[in-house]
Image (tube, rainbow, N blue to C red):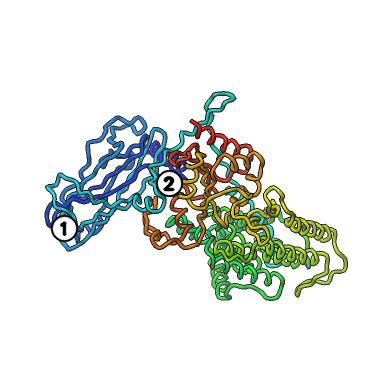
Amino acid sequence: MKQLLFFFVFIYSSLGFSQIFNPVLWETKTEKISDTEYKLISIAKVEKGWHLYAQEIPEFGPVATAFTYDNAASDFTLNGKTIEEKGISIFDPVFEMQITYFEGEVRFEQAVTVTKNITKITGSVLFMACDDEKCTPPTDAPLIFNLKQLPQTNGTESSKKKTLIDNTKANALLYGMAPHTITKANNTCTTNASNTNTSVVITSNDNSLWRIFGLGFLGGLLALLTPCVFPMIPLTVSFFTKKTDASRKASGVSKALLYGFFIFAVYVLLSSPFHLLDSVNPDILNEISTNVWLNVIFFIVFIFFAFSFFGFYELTLPASWTTKTTQGENAGGLIGIFFMALTLAIVSFSCTGPILGSLLAGSLTADGGAWQLTAGMAGFGVALGLPFALFAMFPNMLNALPKSGGWLNTTKVVLGFLELALAFKFLSNADLVAHWNILKIEPFLILWIVIFSGLALYLFGKLKFPHDSPIKKLSFFRISSGILVAAFTIYLASGFKINTTTKTFTPLTLLSGLAPPVGYSFLYPNACPNNLNCFKDLKSGLAYAKQVNKPIMIDFTGLACVNCRKMEEHVWPNPTIDAYLRDDYVLISLYVDDKKALPENEQIDVSRVNGGQRKLKNYGHKWAHFQTEFFQSNSQPYYVLLSSDGKRVLNTPVGYSPDVATYAEFLKCGLEMSKQ
């Protein structure tokens, strides 16, 4: 029973802390007792309302605090165990046992004798913290003990020299403050109408796993309608169901179902390496997606994919891969069926590769990550494997399938135009992040107008590609699709209409996050969205807020962030929202993917919230570190409302919030809290 209780507490804590959060900060200092003896001191600063467990906890209880010291056998010896202060001992009703824990600030000491000439000792501490409702997952924090230039003591006086693990000095240099100087919100607002407390918590997230799964499923359906995959459906299903004996037919159906499952599994497995990257560095997928040269590579690859779909050349994986997987099919049983599914993935690459590339690049955005990629791959695999399983169960349905023909190549060409359009989206990302000022909104719209005009002409039979069949008569579907694409082209042209209120081009809803921001323009340049007054530097924004005595909205955003553009172009222009941002708040927009280099004195090494170190090289690194260090979040957009002095969070920060009424309530709540 106690094991189950611990399991549920841990799962609850894991779900509750999907954002980066750590209520315990660690610092170290060292006392020199003699030429070879030292005292290593670890100090835990536990946030109010939380507690840290002792080193000795009964079996099946919470995770005990445990210290590890590197190279203890070769460089120094441990004199006894790590000593801790006297804690609070209570009977815990959840774990049904007597437990000792600590609150506030607690000190741990470890005596050592140095056997080699070393300047520092490193180690780590594994700990778990809980409050009255939840617990953090077990967390490792690095510890560094300096042994150089320490005054000798009698073992009772503390050395004033500290090695801070919580980036205090770095935060003072970079931001002029430390995380603990900002008071957290109490999550309540008092409305004048009802004089009652209401909590505003917004959890809407358009980039949900189910949405990504749906997009992946749609991509898989498109892949089915290509010449590489579609003709294989009846051939493969017939192979599994051609047995005459009833029992063998049932066996064939079960094998076909397994074949469909393995197709799904192959594509899900392709996303597994990204989970390793994500666990090593939570920011790495954001860094990959906003890397200038990687986006340029995506642009080149998508152009290459597009012309392959147009039929100018064929994309194939090495023939040796197909040979090896085909040999694996002879193994029989589960292994043979798995290799059949793998063979399908390889031989159909010329059609599925570009679609998978779009899925990969689309998931690796500032908003995305490993789980989004897995969800997309899962949707793609389900769509691709489902027909093989479905038609094996109901083989008579094969008669309803349309015959292969020229329409399959038409599907490929249409996908080629879409790949061509997406290519310029990635070039636009690189241009924005690198500040090249080349592919602004005007040339981007012109390029898309040319591409979709070409697609419309192709659907109307005015353009031909190498593998197209002669068109005797345009089908109704082709004519209606051509009209739809032509209408979309006219819609693109409407993006050049001037918005007299914001003095920018009119943002197009369907292009949010795909096209550059409308303020990124040759003709109507605008540094801030919707001609708002904004700051892109924290210190100057804070100084102005104090001067005018207005609350602050920190907008953690990204130059290549899709949902950030949706908020700026379709939520912020609402008259109510615009009035709040223009008149009542000081807007500070911090771009976490800005590659502009930091001044040399700010390019420093800092500790990560979840362990390890990183070097801050550019402004994107600086603001991403600020977000994770101060607000325990690394997703964008992310909106934090602060008091005018920047020392108090007014209410619960929110992410992507497309509902105007809810977002307005969030801003209203912060304004009310700032007046208290």
Residue 61, image quadrant = top left
Q: Secondary structure at mark 1?
A: strand
Q: Residue at x 68, y 52 (%)?
A: 503
In 3D space, how far apart are the residues under numbered discs 1 and 2 (Cα atoms)? 37 Å
Q: Is residue 151 visible?
A: yes
Q: Residue at x 58, y 68 (%)?
A: 296
Residue 478, image quadrant = bottom right
Q: Nearer the viewer, mark 1 or mark 2?
A: 2
Q: Residue at x 70, y 75 (%)?
A: 312
Q: Residue at x 40, y 63 (%)?
A: 600
Which quadrant holds the N terminus?
Answer: top left
Reply above or below: 161 against 310.
Answer: above
Tell me which label, 1 or 2, sits earlier in the chain.
Answer: 1
Q: Is residue 386 visible?
A: no
Q: Farthest front residue?
A: 547
> How crowded is the residue under tag 2: few (<14 C-alpha within 10 Å), some, or many (20+)?
some
Q: Farthest right residue?
A: 473
Three-letter code, disc 1: Val
In the image, 353 versus 661, the foreground residue is 661
User: Which residue position is annotated with label 1?
Assistant: 114
Q: Secondary structure at mark 2?
A: helix
